[in-house]
Image: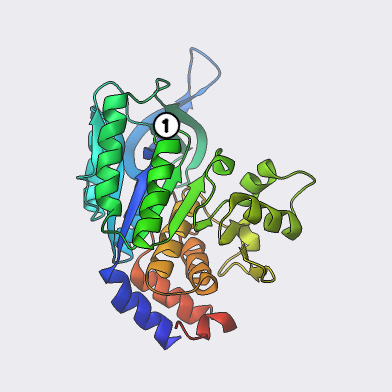
């Protein structure tokens, strides 16, 4: 365990991770229920505050920063208020935003979660409002994005693509990522909400169980996951299964089940997948094998699901979790 802890403390900070994908402003609008409206049978919510946090690929970058490494984030934002709030949130997390392209024709993708409650009571999410741009990315903006991504990938220890289906991650971006991965002999990780089957030939992929079920026939099973790994042409497939932990499929090895750590009832799973791929990428960049990197990612994911809203994990939290919830495999040599 000490060797792994040393890797996290001393090697993480020297790693550079290139992340390209969809940037989302995750907003949490918090309010107090005052009374029932006279206009309609609905509650009146008195606004208290709105908290903006990095979401999607931006959340993965924020997690890499809080874990002590250097994220190089590439994506799009609009020239609007929410885009400015997202930049500020990223900068406050220690993320360099020089790779972000501003597109004045687009609105910043924003997810507003309305949290309501009475005085001295826990707020509950009552509705989510999404702001998106339906138009395709223009060639000029696409070229800018590819250019900045190529620059970031050229000095990266791991390349990550985070696709939430908002237009940034397309075939051109993936082809560039795959070529840069081969050119520099660094891992390429892919997390895609709806288009994973279109991105073949990465080093590893990190779908959740629901996403796997959309790609296979006959129901979810280890055999189906192993078949999917071969179809995606990845060396490893890390499937997150909520409070059932993770399943790791690697080459012709037997599947590895990694139990969830900590409390089994999560507080909020928003953005947990972003944390998982961030920690997984850092583990692989630091010389851990797939099993060890997956164990680290499992701890990181277990920490953030116990926090409210889109969250990050710190290096100290990760080290404490590994110390508290130790599994035999985590004690193996990191060589």
Residue 303 visible here = yes
Q: Is residue 40 left or right of residue 221?
A: left
Q: Position of residue 281 (x, y in %)?
A: 42, 62
Please report the residue visible at 44 percent of the width from the left and 52 percent of the height from the top. 274
The image shows residue 93, relative to residue 137, as above or below, that is: below
Given residues 10 and 181, the one toward you in this image is 181
Given residues 132 and 321, the one toward you in this image is 132
- The residue identified by callout 1 is 167
Q: Position of residue 183 (x, y in %)?
A: 35, 57
Res 282 quadrant in image: bottom left
The image shows residue 175, relative to residue 129, as above or below, that is: below
Given residues 243 and 293, the one toward you in this image is 293
Which residue is the extreme one toward the top? 39
Q: Is residue 71 left or right of residue 4?
A: left
Q: Is residue 262 left or right of residue 317?
A: right
Q: Position of residue 238 (x, y in %)?
A: 57, 60
Please report the residue visible at 65 percent of the width from the left and 48 percent of the height from the top. 212
Given residues 277 and 198, the one toward you in this image is 198
User: How many numbered discs, if any?
Assistant: 1
Please report the residue visible at 43 percent of the width from the left and 21 percent of the height from the top. 134
Which quadrant holds the C terminus?
A: bottom left
């Amino acid at each position: 365990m000490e060797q792994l802890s040393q890797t996290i403390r001393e090697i993480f900070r020297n790693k550079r991770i290139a992340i390209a994908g969809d940037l989302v402003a995750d907003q949490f609008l918090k309010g107090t229920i005052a009374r029932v409206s006279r206009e309609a049978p609905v509650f009146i919510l008195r606004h208290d505050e709105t908290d903006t946090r990095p979401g999607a690929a931006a959340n993965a970058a924020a997690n890499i920063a809080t874990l002590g490494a250097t994220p190089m984030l590439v994506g799009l934002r609009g020239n609007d208020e929410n885009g400015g709030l997202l930049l500020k949130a990223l900068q406050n997390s220690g993320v360099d935003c020089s790779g972000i392209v501003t597109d004045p024709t687009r609105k910043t993708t924003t997810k507003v979660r309305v949290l309501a409650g009475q005085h001295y009571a826990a707020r509950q999410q009552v509705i989510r409002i999404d702001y998106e741009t339906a138009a395709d990315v223009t060639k000029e903006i696409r070229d800018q994005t590819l250019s900045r991504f190529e620059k970031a990938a050229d000095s990266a220890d791991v390349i990550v693509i985070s696709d939430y289906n908002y237009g940034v991650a397309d075939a051109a971006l993936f082809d560039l990522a795959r070529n840069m991965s081969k050119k520099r002999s660094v891992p390429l990780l892919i997390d895609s909400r709806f288009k994973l089957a279109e991105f073949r030939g990465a080093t590893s992929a990190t779908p959740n169980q629901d996403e796997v079920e959309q790609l296979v026939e006959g129901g979810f099973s280890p055999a189906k996951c192993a078949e999917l790994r071969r179809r995606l042409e990845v060396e490893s497939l890390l499937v997150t299964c909520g409070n059932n932990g993770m399943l790791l499929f690697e080459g012709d090895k037997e599947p590895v089940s990694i139990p969830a750590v900590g409390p089994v009832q999560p507080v909020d799973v928003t953005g947990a997948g972003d944390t998982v791929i961030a920690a997984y990428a850092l583990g692989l960049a630091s010389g851990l094998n797939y099993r060890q990197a997956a164990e680290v990612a499992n701890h990181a994911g277990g920490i953030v699901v116990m926090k409210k809203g889109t969250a990050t994990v710190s290096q100290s939290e990760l080290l404490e979790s590994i110390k508290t919830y130790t599994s035999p495999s985590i004690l193996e040599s990191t060589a």
